[in-house]
Image: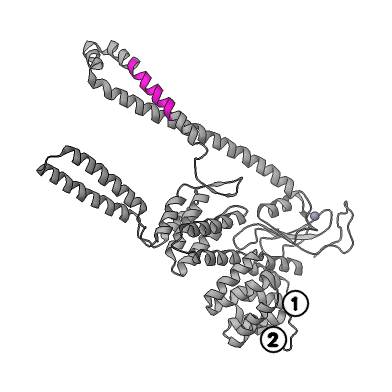
Amino acid sequence: MRLWQAAARDLGEHALALQLDEACPSDLDGRSSWTGRSYDLIQLGRSAQARDELLRAGATPPSGSDLTARDVVLAAACAACGDDGAWHWLLAAAARIDGGAWLAALVGAVADQRGELATADSAWVAARGSGAHGRTARVRAGVAIVASRRRDDPQDVGRLVLDVVGAAIAADLERRPGVAVAIAQGLLERGDVAGARLVLRTTLMLVPSSAEVRAALGAVPARRPVTVVAVATALAAVLIGGLIALTTVVPAPGVRVIGIVAVSLGGALWARRVPLPGMTAAESAVWRDVRGLVWDEQEQRLVPPGNRNGGWYGIAAIAGLAAGTALVAPALAALSALAGSGFAAWADSGSAGFAYLAGAALGTAGGVLLVRWAIRARRRSRARRELSARAQSRAREGASCRCWSDAWLRGWLAEETAAQHLADAQALAVIPGSQVRRCPSTGTLWLVGPLAADGLWLALRGDAPRAAPQPDQQGDGFYL
Ligand SMILES: [Zn+2]
C-alpha cells in the first residue's frame, strides 16, 4: 500500500496518494508516511492542514545542521502559511542540498502559494528539468517558459512555444491537449493573452480535431485579426478610388492599371506583415507561420505541411493544364458538329479564346484535386495500417513483466500491462475505479485503473513477495 502511495506521489498524483492514505489510515504509523502525506497536502494547496497534522504528529522546527525530509516539509508548510522565517530557511536548505525534483516541486508549490512568482517559475522549471512527472510540474514549467520568451525575437518566440507545446502533447501518451490548454489558461491568468493564443493555436495544429482546444481558443478575449484585414481593405479602397478619380481628370490608363495592382499588392503585403492586435511583430510572425504546421510522427516535431507532396501537385497541375488545353479543340469540333454552322463559325472566330482559358483552368484544377484525393486516400490507408500495427506492438509491450524495472506505468502501457500481463488478484478494490492485479511470475500486486487526475490509466507497483520467485510461481496465498 505504501509503495502505491509513493508511486502516486512520484507521478505527481497527490490527490490519489491522499486517497490511498485515507483508504488505509493504519499505514500512517511512521514518520516518513506523515512526511509524504504532508507533502501531498502542500502540493494540493492544503498547507495549513499539513502544518497542523505534522505538529500534532510531534514534528518540531529543525535544530542543528541535520536535515530530514520532515524538517523540510514542515518548514515548507509553515512558509506556505506566511511564516517568512521558515521561507528563508527553506530557500537556504534548498540551495544547500540536492533534493532533485522532489524539493524543487516543493519550493515551487510554496512559492506559488506565497505569490513569489519569479521563484516559483524557476523552481518549477528546475523540477521539470530534474524529471518531475506530475501534471502540475508540466503545466507550471510550461507557463514559466512561454512567459519568459523575448517578445521581440521571432526565433525565441517560435522555439519556446513549439518546444513547450510539442513536449506537452508528446508527454501525454494519448496525445491529448489537456496540459497545453492548462498552460494557456495559466498564461491568461497572468495577463499574457498573446502567449495563451500562440500556445492554443500551435496545439490546434497538433490535434486539429480537438473541440476542447477550439473552444479554449474561441474563449480567449482577443481582438480579432479580421480588423487588420478590414483596415487594409478600406485603405486600399480609398487609395484606388482616389486613383480612379485622379486618372479620370488626367487621362492616363497605364498609370491607373499599374496603380490599382500596386495598391492591391501593397495592401495584401501590409495585412500580412502588420502586427496583429495584442501581439508584437515577432509574435504575429510566429502566429502566421504556425498555421498549417503538422505533427510528424517519426520525427516527433511540427513540420510544414505538404512539403513532401509539393512535387506531385506541380506535376499534376502541369499535366492537367496540358490535357485541359488539348481537349478544347476536339470539344469545340464535336460541339460544332452537333450545334450547326452558327456555333462552328463562332468556334473558328477569335472569341473562342476564352474556351482555351477555361479548359486550361479546369484541367489544372482537376489535376490538383485528383492528386489531393490520391494523397488523402494514401494517408488514410497508411493511418489505418499504423493504427493496427501500433495496437499489436502495444499488446506485445504490455505482455512483458516490469515488476523489477518500473514503480509505475502510465497511459496505454499501464492499460496493456493490466490486460496482457497481470492477472486478477481476487482482492477488493482499494479505492473506487481501481483494481488490484497480480503479476503471475513475481506475485507483485499492482493497483491499476483510470486513476490519474486527468483520467489517464495508471499502474502502481505494490509489495512484492520477499523471496525471489520462480518463473512459474502463481503467488498463492498473497493477499492484501
Ligand atoms: Zn510481472
Q: Closer to the observer: label 1 or label 2?
A: 1
Q: Amino acid type of disc 1?
A: Ser
**Residue indicated by mark 1:** 32
Q: Quadrant of ligand 1?
A: bottom right
Mark 1 and mark 2 lie on one chain; the one further toward the N terminus is 1
Vertical arrangement, residue 354 with respect to residue 293, above or below: above
- Label annotation for residue 249: none
Vertical arrangement, residue 391 with respect to residue 432, above or below: above
Residue 322 falls inside the magenta stretch: yes
Quadrant occupied by the C terminus: bottom right
**Magenta residues (range):** 317-329
184 or 246, nearer to the observer? 246
User: Tag 1, which secondary structure?
Assistant: helix
Name the residue rendered at 58%, 57% in the picture: 167
**Residue indicated by mark 2:** 56
252 or 270, nearer to the observer? 252
For residue 220, side relative to residue 65 (left or right): left
Residue 1 in view of the camera: no
84 or 136, nearer to the observer? 84
Picture quadrant of residue 176: bottom right
Residue 180 placed where, x, y %? 53, 59
Q: Amino acid type of disc 2?
A: Arg
Residue 283 placed where, x, y %? 43, 58
Disc 2, ligand 1: is the CB inside 8 Å? Answer: no
Name the residue rendered at 35%, 57% in the picture: 224
Residue 204 placed where, x, y %? 49, 52
Name the residue rendered at 65%, 82% in the picture: 92
